[in-house]
Image (spheres, helix red, strand yellow):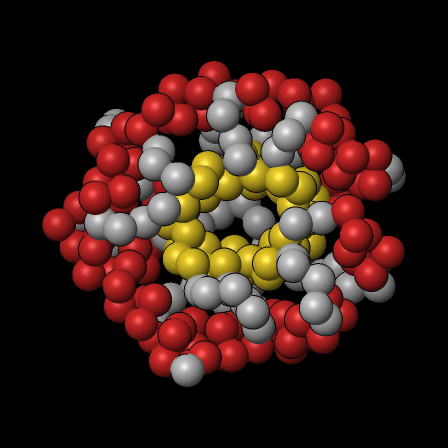
Amino acid sequence: MHPVTICPSILSGDFSALGSECRALAEAGSDWVHVDVMDGHFVPNLTFGPQMCAVLRPHIQGTMDVHLMIAPVDPYVEAYAKSGADILSAHIEAGPHVHRTLQAIRGTGCKAGLAINPGTGLDAVAHLLDDIDLVNVMGVNPGFGGQKLIPATIAKVRQLRAMIADRPIRIQVDGGVNARTIHALASAGADLLVAGAAVFEGGPEAYRRNIESLRATAEGVLA
């Protein structure tokens, strides 16, 4: 198991000051920023293009974790890699040739993540475990922040942890992560917890307290 990492989702930040938000997260002790890319087609929302990611990159200290909720994915892998992403995660549901997509991501030098929607089982993931660095288990139906965790996510994470065995693959949960749910998710085996409102509530002066509280809760489960 890796240490638990809290991954603030910049989707919940102040869109009028995203650079400042990223700097505030670094000052609060966060070494990851999760960037949710939505295309209005694969999911019902529009967010960040490659140029926006490139603009954010200088303000992010540490890992820029880019979650591609787009279809198709392959034509945009290079652009998002050049924007400064350290990790690119693509959805298994976004196209028929996910293995090719993962190869393309790794070919850019980025780490490869595989994201799966709540209605997608783990059978196909088993055949891709040697081609990925993380699995992003969606805890909600993607497209909007602020949703409640789908309870079946916990059992899915536990099953995935058993499948991964001793491989150095991280399990990320995106959606519905807060002080009430992080106990169960961390104990099931998730070590990358994407949090939106649970981090950003209260403004920049509260970010450190929020992050430390979430991390302490998760580490208490694993101790």
Q: Residue at x 65, y 76 (%)?
A: 158
Tell me if residue 221 comes above or below residue 139 in the rendering.
Answer: below
What is the quadrant of the N terminus in the image?
A: bottom right
Q: Residue at x 34, y 36 (%)?
A: 61
The foreground one among 156 and 111 is 111
Residue 35, x across and y down, in percent: 47, 38
Q: As drawn, is 38 to the left or to the right of 12?
A: right
* Image vertical order of residue 91 relative to residue 56, above or below: below
- Image-based side of 99 in relation to 156, left or right: right
Q: Quadrant of residue 164?
A: bottom right
Q: Residue furthest left?
A: 205
Seen from the viewer's position, the closer of residues 52 and 150 is 52
Percent position of residue 184, x then y: 49, 79
46 over 206 or under it: above or below: above
Q: Where 37 falls versus 92 (above or below)?
A: above
Q: Nearer the viewer, residue 166 or 183?
A: 166
Q: Of residues 186 and 10, which is closer to you in this image?
A: 186
The answer to whether residue 160 shows anywhere in this view is no
Q: Residue at x 32, y 49 (%)?
A: 30
Residue 140 figure quarter: bottom right
**Which residue is pictured at 70% across the width and 68% down the height?**
166
Image quadrant in which the C terminus is located: bottom left
User: At which x and y percent is residue 21?
Assistant: 26, 37
